[in-house]
Structures are given as C-alpha cells and as structure tokens.
Image (spheres, helix red, strand yellow):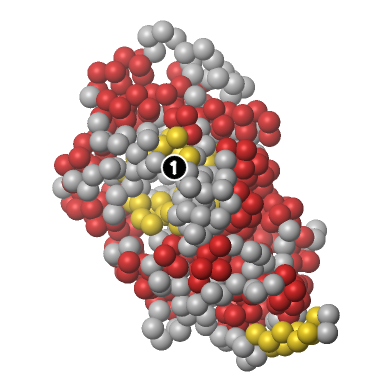
Amino acid sequence: MPWTQTLAGRTHRFDDLKTLLARATPPRSGDALAGVAAESAAERIAAQLTLADLPLKAFLSEALVPYETDEVSRLIIDSHDATAFAPVAHLTVGDLRNWLLGPAATPAALRALAPGLIPEMAAAVSKLMRLQDLILVAKKCHVTTGFRNTIGLPGHLAVRLQPNHPTDELRGVAASLLDGLMYGCGDAVIGINPASDSLRVIGDLLRLLDGVIQRHAIPTQGCVLTHVTNTLRLIDEGVPVDLVFQSIAGSEQANAGFGITLSLLRQAQQAALSLNRGTVGCNVMYFETGQGSALSANAHHGVDQQTMEARAYGVARAYAPLLTNTVVGFIGPEYLFDGKQIVRAGLEDHFCGKLLGVPMGCDICYTNHAEADSDDMDALMTLLGAAGVNFIMGVPGADDIMLNYQSTSFHDAAVLREVLGLKRAPEFEAWLAQVGIAGDDGRLLPAPARHALLTDLSGRA
C-alpha cells in the first residue's frame, strides 16, 4: 500500500514497504548507488515519520523479497514465533523504539522477544535511532554461546586471533599466532583466511591450529575460513574441524552467489555437530556478513543494504552460531563511503543482530581507498565496546597482509579492555593465568624468554 507524508508544504509518497524503508535509511553510498536512497533530507525525515507510525504487524503481511521465490523470506516468515511477538504485537515501529529504550526492556525481556521479531522489524526501528540509542539497547541484549569457552557474557570481550599469511606459509602463520596469544587474544576463535583453495593447504592449516590448541590445552576453537563445501570434504577426510565457516547474505540469490543454500548450511552444521569436539557448548557455526554484499551481487531486490544485512542475521540465527561477524567496512566506499557511514553501519549491524538473538562481533575495518582512517576505527571500536559487542578482530599491527585491508590489532583489544574494564572468556582468561601470559587479574605479564608456546610454535612448521 502507498503512504504519503506532508512536510513543509510538500507531500512525499512511498509506494511500498521497501521504498519506505529505503527512504528512511540514514545516508550511505550503497543506497545511492542502487538508486533507492532518499533524494533529500526532507524526504528522509518524511519517511522516518511515516515509518514511526507503521504497525509492526505490517512486516508480517508484506514480504520485501517475494516469499514464493526466496528461501530466506520463507525462513524468516515460517520461523516467526507469534507467542514471543505477542507482547509488542500492538506497537508501531516508533512505539517499539520507545519500549526498547525504556525500563521494561530488560535483558530477560529482550531475550524472550528475539524469536518474535523478524529482521525487517529490527532494521526498521534502527532507522529511527541515534547512535546512543543503538548502543543503549544493544548493551541490554545478552547473547551467550559456547564451544570450548563461553562467549558473550556481560562485561566480557573476546577477540578473533587472525594470523593470515599471503602464501599460507605455516611458519608465518605460527609467528602471528604466537604474537596474538602473547597479547591474550584468541578466545573468540583462532581463524585463518586462507590464500589458497587447496584442500591440502587448508588441511595443513587446520592441523596446525588443532595441534597448538590440543598440545597446550587452550580453551578456544580453530577455524579456517574456507567455503563450506571444502570444510565438508575435509570433515569426511578426518581433518580436525572445530567450526564451520561461511559468508551469508539476506536473499536466496545473494547466497547462490556465495555457492550456498540453506539446506547446505544445515548439512554442514549437522556434520560439525557429529564430531562432538566442543567441551562447554555445541555452537559450531561461524558466519560473516557485510552491508552491500547483496547489492554487489545484484541480488538486493530493490531493498536498502542495511535491511538486507538484517535479513542475513535471520539466516544466521537459524543455525545457532558461535560467532557472527559483520565485516563492516570491507566491501569498500561504493557501499560505505567514509568513516561516518562505517561507524553508523557497525552500530546498526550490532544492534540488529543482538536484537534478533544473534551473537554479534564486528570486524572494525576499512579499505585503503575509503575516506576513513584509524581514528574512525578507534571511535567505532570504543562505541561497540560500550555497546557490549561479543568480539572484535585481532590482526598483527591492524594491517592484514593477506586481505590488504585495515582492521584492529592485538594492542587495540588490550586498550579496549583496559578502558572499559572488560574481561576475556572466563575459561581462556584462566588458561592465560595458568601458563603465565596474564596474571589473575587478567593483566598481561612479561613473556618468559623460553615460553613453552614459543618453543613449540618455532618448531611446528
């Protein structure tokens, strides 16, 4: 149905729900590229005023991407929990914003509500929020997961140790791995982006990670971020696999561009569960997303990129992941032009994911041709830390020499923990104290000259 809103003597018309959502979205270059952005600030405000008065129930009767032709839409609608939705079913989008910011939205209430919200609702309410609103609500959303340690507890911050190497050279990976462990990083996952698609190379990387983790009884998990079909083949070959990784998006067509279907993800989840390698939990999936991924595949169906990103979280939560990570500035300035847009997008993604019950982390990053710098990343990192982000990246020197982009470093994580008083995953923090990397208070200690890890890793490759 069309909506109209008169503002300053001009009437603005929004012909359907996806147009209304797109016009209400804060500015970003990807929506301008797609031709769906508001033409003026006045049109954006008119759309936001209209959206604020829209009943939440409207999102259950008008699919942005056709139900009949899109399995993501079918997943979202068919898995909607009407009982969980009931407490807010009478509200408008603006009412939901007010409720989320109020005292009734306790962590327990938000946890109970999550299955009753669909991604489009989360995206819609985020468009009416300032940054402080996104932070305040996300802070109250506690999403805890576990495999060999517990991630997402209030007052905790985990770090993915990312020891990438441009040629997958095992000694280079081992050096970065040791560096990260000595800085107390790696409780989220030790996760390698491989430069090669070779199953032999990927298998060698997985064996390296598993050997270090098992030899030193490190309460964490390893992952090589290869395509899900490669991981399935490696599981069949008996290679040690902890987590299954896959990039996902918010439409069937976009996921097809990644070479996946929802049934393939379910197959991979079941395969990883059958290995029974977790000790404190059985969350075995690791997903990555990013605003603009559907648009870059021409698979956005005229929907704004932030709403499409929220739909990806609808996919993620169906598979109970250990980690879901928005790689917020990685795709480039065509989609998020500058630091201001990246900061906004990172907080939106974190808010929407957490509101939907997804364990959210963020790769706080930018490409070298974006209008952004490390000061922008410091700002986003600090804001996400205040918002209760589950995990961030730990990259040597913040400069990924394989993927050629700028992220956050081991040092950055140490600063964030110091400033905000955040702890690591409890099992991992206890291990750091046990082996002498950190004290009982979690503070890093000077590394012994011949630490057992140093001796082991220097000879493993």
Q: Residue at x 56, y 85 (%)?
A: 62
In the rendered image, residue 153, in percent from the top left (x then y), is placed at 59, 43
Q: Residue at x 35, y 52 (%)?
A: 245
Front-lying residue, 11 or 291 = 11
Q: Is residue 21 above or below residue 454?
A: below
Q: Amino acid at mark 1?
A: Tyr
Q: Is residue 410 above or below residue 196?
A: above
In the rendered image, residue 186, in percent from the top left (x then y), is placed at 45, 34
Q: Residues within 10 Å of mark 1 (few under 14, many from 20)?
A: some
**Is residue 129 in view from this perspective?**
yes
Q: Residue at x 51, y 46 (%)?
A: 366
Q: Quadrant of residue 72?
A: bottom left
In the rendered image, residue 388, in percent from the top left (x then y), is placed at 64, 46
Front-lying residue, 168 or 221 = 168
Q: Which residue is identified by label 1?
A: 405
Q: Is residue 265 above or below residue 412?
A: below
Q: Quadrant of residue 124?
A: bottom right
Q: Quadrant of residue 6?
A: bottom right
In the rendered image, residue 422, in percent from the top left (x then y), is placed at 63, 34
Q: Is residue 404 left or right of residue 62?
A: left
Q: Residue at x 41, y 37 (%)?
A: 400
Residue at the farthest top position: 449
Is label 1 in a helix, a strand or a loop?
Answer: strand
